[in-house]
Image (spheres, helix red, strand yellow):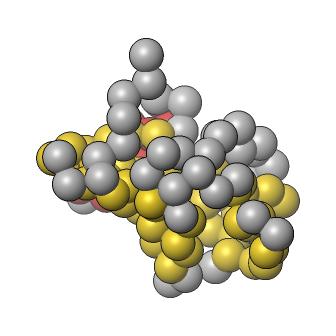
């Protein structure tokens, strides 16, 4: 099993997200949404980058909306409402927060 496959398996078992790096300046993880899944995230206090490893769906970022496909890079500024929807093929996303995402308490 590759490192990415390991992280995807962890994300699936951890309700969609598995963090694998945390330093003060950034944190990174893998976010997985199954086909038909509902993305329930809310705006973050950090800037965020998504890299679409595989899968297909739609992405709403503020007032903008469009398709997402493998290889796409998506930027979300801090506090911007955003979400994936209409997921037609399991989405596997590399996620980077800067600065490090604050832990949920």
Residue in view at x 68 percent, y 75 percent:
68
Left or right? Give the position of 55 relative to 49. Answer: right
Task: Residue 49: give x, y in percent of width and height.
Answer: 45, 67
The residue lying at 46 percent from left, 40 percent from top is: 17
Give the x, y percent position of residue 101: 36, 42
| Between 105 and 10, the one nearer to me in the picture | 105
Is residue 11 visible in this depiction of the protein? Answer: yes
From this view, report whether residue 57 is shown above or below residue 84. below
Kindly give the residue lying farthest to the bottom in the view shown: 71
User: At 37% from the left edge and 55% from the top edge, which residue is drawn?
Assistant: 97
Point 50% across, 79% down: residue: 73
Quarter assignment of residue 98: bottom left
- Most foreground residue, 73 or 4: 73
Please indicate whether residue 70 sits to the left or right of residue 62 in the image. left
The residue sitting at the left extreme is 23
**What is the x, y in percent for residue 53?**
47, 71
Q: Residue 10, percent across and down? A: 38, 37
Q: Is residue 50 visible?
A: no
The C terminus sits in image quarter: top left
């Amino acid at each position: 099993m590759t490192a990415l496959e390991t992280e995807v398996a962890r994300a699936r078992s951890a309700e969609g997200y598995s963090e694998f790096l945390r330093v003060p300046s950034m944190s990174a993880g893998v976010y997985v949404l199954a086909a038909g899944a509902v993305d329930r995230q809310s705006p973050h206090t950090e800037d965020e980058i998504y890299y679409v490893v595989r899968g297909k769906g739609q992405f709403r970022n503020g007032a903008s909306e469009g398709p997402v496909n493998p290889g796409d890079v998506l930027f979300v500024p801090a506090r911007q409402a955003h979400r994936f929807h209409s997921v037609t093929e399991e989405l596997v996303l590399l996620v980077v927060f800067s600065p490090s995402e604050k832990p949920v308490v």
